[in-house]
């Protein structure tokens, strides 16, 4: 049962953490742990100094205690899940807290993962063992006594092989507790994994204590004064706004901007960047001046704009609710209970339907509705709590309703006096230079990244990655590549490819031709469905299904038409016997009543077209074979097909500049791999030398 939750899908931008006891009698010199509930209280007290003033992007760090009991030896005693949204600082702050916890309690082992899996290993991708992959890392990575531990084997505590075997949680914890020195990751891995935490806890303040002056409605200033964490909900609502939500900002009924005040707002860097970076046209209601004179200092344009964005965010959060209604919390709890009840009823009804409760009755029929009503009454009777036992908990509400309840409760209090807000007003905003990337800093970042890439290329891991690529044939490199590449072989393979015919799916390479090629009567199944076999070109398909009738073709009429189009008589070239026709060569069948003319054919047509193109710029671009005499006309020299083929392929490959392209892809299908271009300034004309 220990692996029943091993493959739970973690939502995107969410970190999951679980805390386990070290197996009994394995934590040498460690005091026994208290009960999970008492342990939770102690852990919260330990971490409170770090989390007290921290602003979370979406949800706070929160642990839940799991009761002890039989069969829970390898189940977590504490666990939690936090959505961090776009703020990676939240995720790494949680890693800092968990590492601090594992240092204080040597009897505890911590696992932490997110939607990317073992994200700690991503930080040390260049230093971790080569055998460790995302596929075999489950139950192998732990935080124990402040260090990162990697379990190498899933068989026993004495067998530390590197084979890619699955590991169970019980095996991992047992090996970790028995031989912690053997499972501790190398110093290089430790430095890479925890590099982001070097400045903690000092970096916490830099991230979560960014302050600016904002011109906001008095009620917004009141909320942020008492509960700064509400800023996260407002920023997210504004950042994810849609046209429907913006309708609420036309009137600003809950947070009228007329009562604006200057106040100090504390942000995280992520929240501030999300708010300032959004282009936003302020609603017309923000164009009016301060009517009641609540603000004693004239705000700047930036202070007005940022404050208006925050006000709109709070208006969207409240979703048009009347915050002056004292019965609003009861209404929210009632609506939440109804939603939960509706969900449970739908699940209950689906189970009844799966078990055949409704029989063959169709939904909507009279008997079906009668059975559904009876089932609904029984469901409500069972789910109704005993009289006087109804209890409400904040956990009954979703995050949005919980935020509305918090806002409603704070607004029942008297608003913070303007003098108090003015006394807390900072003289100027904190520097936002961190939002802008300077060229020197960018160059430094790129330089470090290039150094990392260079080290990776030089390492054995890079060679292992290259060798593990699944290809039909190994790709030669270096001197082997230059020796392996043969121009004549390339020309021969191209010629063989061109001599073959194309099928319905297009041109086929030798290694792609199916074994069933040539079989008759079998239909081909493609991505478009079942396609019939292609009839040979030159045969006509008649209604009775016979495909043996020859194609009627009038060559005299065809060549006369072509001659008129070209404006010149068609010469009769010598017969080319260098290429023998293949079995699938296209055949032109003539009608029995028409005489055959052996002089006329496809070669005649092609010869006429060659003659016409010879005097154009296209003809001048061809490479020609050397003539026997020096005085011979250059245009009379025959075209060197092979040389033109090589020249054009090399030019196309060079134009790719090392990137994927048509020439490289085509050569790769022939298992040909050109060496890299050693000289980039070679003229195209040199190719023909």
Image (cartoon, helix red, strand yellow):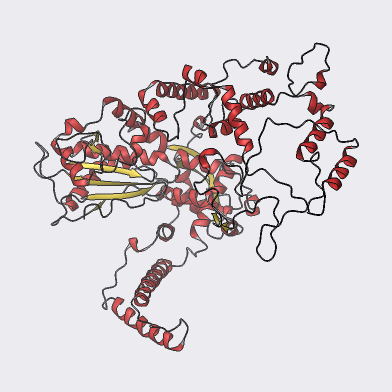
**Location of residue 114 with respect to 677 vertically, above or below:** below
Query: In the visual, does 331 lie left or right of 625?
Result: left
Q: Is 137 or 402 nearer to us in this picture? A: 137
Q: Nearer the viewer, residue 513 or 397?
A: 513
Query: Who's the residue at 73% across and 21% down the image?
Result: 623
Q: Is residue 542 above or below residue 196?
A: below
Query: Looking at the image, is 407 positioned above or below residue 149?
Result: below
Q: Nearer the viewer, residue 613 or 56?
A: 613
Which quadrant holds the N terminus?
A: bottom left
- In the rendered image, residue 110, in percent from the top left (x then y), is placed at 24, 42
Q: Quadrant of residue 583?
A: top right
Compared with 88, 314 (above or below) is below
Taking the spot 74% from the left edge, 53% from the top edge, the residue there is 551
Position of residue 644 in the picture relative to residue 424 (left or right):
right
Q: Residue 18: where, in percent of width, then height?
A: 26, 47
Instruction: Using residue 543 as the reference point, say whether residue 466 is left or right of it.
Output: left
Residue 257 place in picture, x, y as percent: 57, 53
Q: Is any part of residue 52 visible from this angle?
A: no
**How many numbered marks does the figure carry?**
0
**Quarter of the image where one finds residue 689:** top right
Q: Position of residue 682 (x, y in %)?
A: 65, 15
């Amino acid at each position: 049962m220990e692996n029943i939750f091993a493959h739970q899908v973690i939502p995107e931008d969410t970190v999951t953490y679980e805390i386990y006891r070290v197996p009994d009698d394995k934590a040498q010199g460690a005091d026994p742990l208290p009960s999970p509930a008492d342990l939770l209280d102690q852990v919260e007290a330990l971490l409170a100094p770090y989390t007290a003033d921290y602003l979370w992007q979406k949800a706070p760090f929160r642990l839940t205690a799991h009761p002890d009991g039989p069969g829970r030896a390898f189940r977590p005693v504490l666990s939690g899940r936090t959505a961090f949204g776009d703020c990676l600082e939240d995720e790494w702050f949680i890693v800092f807290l968990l590492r601090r916890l594992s240092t204080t309690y040597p009897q505890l082992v911590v696992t932490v993962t997110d939607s990317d899996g073992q994200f700690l290993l991503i930080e040390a991708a260049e230093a971790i063992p080569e055998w460790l992959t995302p596929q075999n890392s489950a139950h192998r990575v732990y935080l124990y006594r402040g260090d990162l531990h990697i379990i190498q084997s899933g068989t026993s505590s004495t067998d530390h092989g590197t084979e890619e075997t699955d590991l169970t949680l019980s095996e991992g914890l047992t090996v970790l507790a028995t031989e912690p020195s053997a499972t501790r990751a190398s110093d290089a891995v430790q430095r890479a994994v925890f590099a982001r935490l070097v400045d903690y806890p000092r970096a916490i303040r830099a991230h979560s204590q960014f302050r600016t002056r904002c011109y906001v409605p008095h009620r917004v200033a009141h909320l942020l004064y008492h509960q700064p964490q509400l800023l996260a909900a407002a920023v997210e609502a504004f950042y994810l706004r849609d046209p429907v939500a913006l309708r609420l900002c036309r009137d600003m009924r809950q947070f009228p901007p007329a009562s604006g005040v200057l106040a100090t707002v504390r942000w995280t860097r992520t929240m501030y960047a999300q708010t300032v970076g959004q282009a936003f046209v302020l609603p017309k209601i923000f164009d009016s001046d301060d009517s009641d004179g609540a603000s004693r200092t004239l705000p700047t344009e930036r202070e007005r704009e940022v404050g208006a964005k925050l006000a709109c965010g709070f208006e969207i959060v409240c979703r048009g609710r009347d915050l002056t209604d004292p019965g609003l919390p009861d209404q929210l709890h009632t609506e939440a209970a109804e939603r939960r009840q509706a969900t449970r009823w739908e699940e209950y009804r689906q189970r009844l339907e799966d078990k055949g409760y409704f029989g063959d009755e169709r939904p909507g029929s009279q008997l079906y509705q009668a059975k559904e009503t009876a089932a609904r009454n029984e469901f409500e009777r069972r789910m109704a709590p005993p009289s006087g036992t109804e209890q409400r908990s904040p956990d009954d509400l979703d995050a949005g309703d919980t935020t509305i309840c918090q806002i409603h409760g704070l607004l029942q209090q008297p608003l913070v006096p303007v003098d108090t807000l003015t006394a807390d007003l900072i003289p100027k905003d904190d520097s936002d230079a961190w939002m802008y990337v300077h060229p020197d800093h960018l160059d430094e970042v790129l330089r470090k990244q290039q150094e990392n890439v260079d080290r990776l290329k030089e390492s054995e891991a890079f060679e292992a990655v290259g060798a593990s690529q699944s290809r039909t044939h190994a790709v030669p490199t270096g001197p082997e590549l230059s020796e392996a590449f043969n121009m004549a072989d390339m020309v021969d393979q191209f010629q063989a490819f061109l001599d073959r015919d194309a099928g319905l799916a297009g041109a086929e390479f030798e290694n792609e031709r199916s074994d069933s090629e040539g079989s008759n009567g079998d239909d081909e199944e493609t991505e478009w469905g079942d396609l019939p076999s292609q009839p040979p070109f030159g045969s006509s398909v008649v209604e009775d299904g016979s495909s043996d009738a020859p194609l009627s073709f009038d060559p005299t009429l065809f060549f006369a038409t072509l001659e008129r189009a070209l404006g010149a008589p068609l010469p009769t070239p010598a017969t080319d016997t260098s290429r023998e026709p293949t079995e699938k060569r296209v055949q032109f069948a003539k009608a029995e009543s028409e005489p055959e003319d052996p002089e006329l054919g496809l070669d005649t047509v092609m010869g006429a077209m060659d003659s016409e193109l010879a005097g154009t710029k296209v003809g001048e671009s061809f490479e020609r074979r050397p003539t026997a005499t020096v005085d011979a006309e250059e245009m009379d020299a025959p075209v060197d097909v092979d040389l033109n083929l090589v020249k054009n392929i090399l030019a196309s490959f060079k134009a790719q500049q090392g990137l994927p392209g048509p020439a490289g892809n085509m050569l790769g299908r022939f298992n040909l791999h050109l060496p890299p271009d050693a000289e980039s300034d070679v003229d195209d004309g040199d190719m023909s030398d």
